[in-house]
Image (spheres, grey):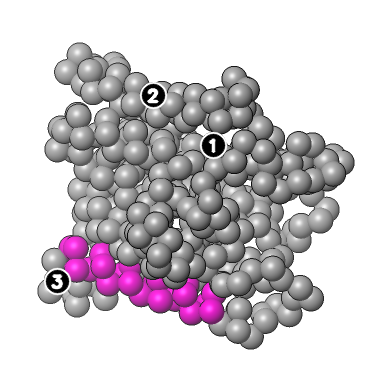
Amino acid sequence: MTLAARRFPGWVEALAIGAVSRAFSIAILVGAWALHIPAASWRSFDSPFVIWDGQWYTFIARYGYHAEAVVKSQYGPGLHDFAFFPAWPILLQVLSLDNRLPLDVVAPIAANVLFLVAAVAIYSILERVGGRAVARWGLALFSFSPAAHVYSLAYSEPLFLVFVSRFFIALDERYSARASLLALGAQLVRVTGAALAFASLPDLLHRETRTRGLLVIGACILAFGAWWTWIAILTGDPMGYMLGTPSWFLNQRPEPIPTGIASFFEPSVPPWISIVALALIAVLAVGTRWVWRRGEARLALFSFACLASTMLDTQTTMPRLAAIAFPAFGGLAAILPSDRWRWLVLGAFAVVQAVIAANVVQRYLVP
């Protein structure tokens, strides 16, 4: 692998890793869907690529947002579509030519292409931090991680990764205005765009970077504030945002769904999911420590914020949230003692991804 890779530019290698990983994830999703693995007694999805949150995003792209709950529940006020941030459904509406093209096809194609775009930028960042071997193996571990199948679904993560990876490249190239715009875009894709504001805290400590840090933090606050204000206007409630994501786990059963550490003890979920979530967070925390010790405070703080966000969700979703912390995968690649170990971890990641993806597509888990 190493000798062959030296013959190609880094971006070619990044595209190759990204493409192979997408082919793997797509094969698992399609195979599990076609073969009913595991055999589900029922399922409500029309496509293996437009499941769970993907249904919400394509629904919003078709019909827009609504003041009232889209899904009613006997518990709480119901589930609101504005729990999902607007940048991805807006992009889907544009790419589908205002729904003239089938969204169920456009969305997964766009997600996979965007992942390839992000893969090139991520490779570049990791190569600067640790060299070509770290870039190669870090991107491979990231692309085949246990939750990496979501990058082939109609989810917003690939678009988020494009904004985030280009943000760190803009910082390297000292483009403060561009970094601020990219941070604003990331914040309009996912609430975890706030991780970029957290990553910019070190900029406030130095006079030469303070303005840039303030601009990035201000951009994140502006984007989130604009979204909060728009929801308030839509619902006629200044606290309307709280009916979205913050109340999501209060509307599905009499007792709130436990989140964070408490979710590890949720009896309705197989224990192996908790083990996977805990193990992934632990190894990425070790990788984040390597990035920090490398002197890459911004990348380390971004990874730390991504890992910390897992404590706001359930253990079934934690691998997906933790997997966004791409710098940590570079750190993990760097601390593994040899290529043999890297192949073993890569293989383990791929196997776990296959198991999770098969369960996800058959409505056993919520990614």
In this view, the residue in front, 222 or 216, is: 222
Work out whether 166 lies above or below 232. below
- Answer whether residue 280 is visible to the viewer in this image: no
**Considering only order in the chain, which callout, 3 or 1, is on the residue closer to the N terminus?**
3
Picture coordinates of residue 255, whole percent (x, y): 84, 39
Picture coordinates of residue 56, whole percent (x, y): 57, 53
Horizontally, is 312 left or right of 346 in the view? right
- Answer whether residue 77 is visible to the viewer in this image: yes
Amino acid carrying mark 2 in the image? Leu
For the C terminus, give its image quadrant: bottom right
**Residue at left offset 71%, top offset 48%:** 71
On the image, numbered disc 1 is attached to which residue? 308
Frontmost of labels 2 and 1 is 2
Amino acid carrying mark 1 in the image? Ala
- Magenta segment, prevailing SS (helix, strand or loop): helix
**Gap in Å between the C-alphas at discs 2 and 1?**
22 Å
Q: Secondary structure at mark 1?
A: helix
On the image, numbered disc 3 is attached to which residue? 8
In this view, the residue in front, 276 or 111, is: 111
In this view, the residue in front, 262 or 338, is: 262
Q: Secondary structure at mark 3?
A: loop
**Gap in Å between the C-alphas at discs 1 and 3?**
37 Å
Frontmost of labels 2 and 3 is 2
On the image, numbered disc 2 is attached to which residue? 222
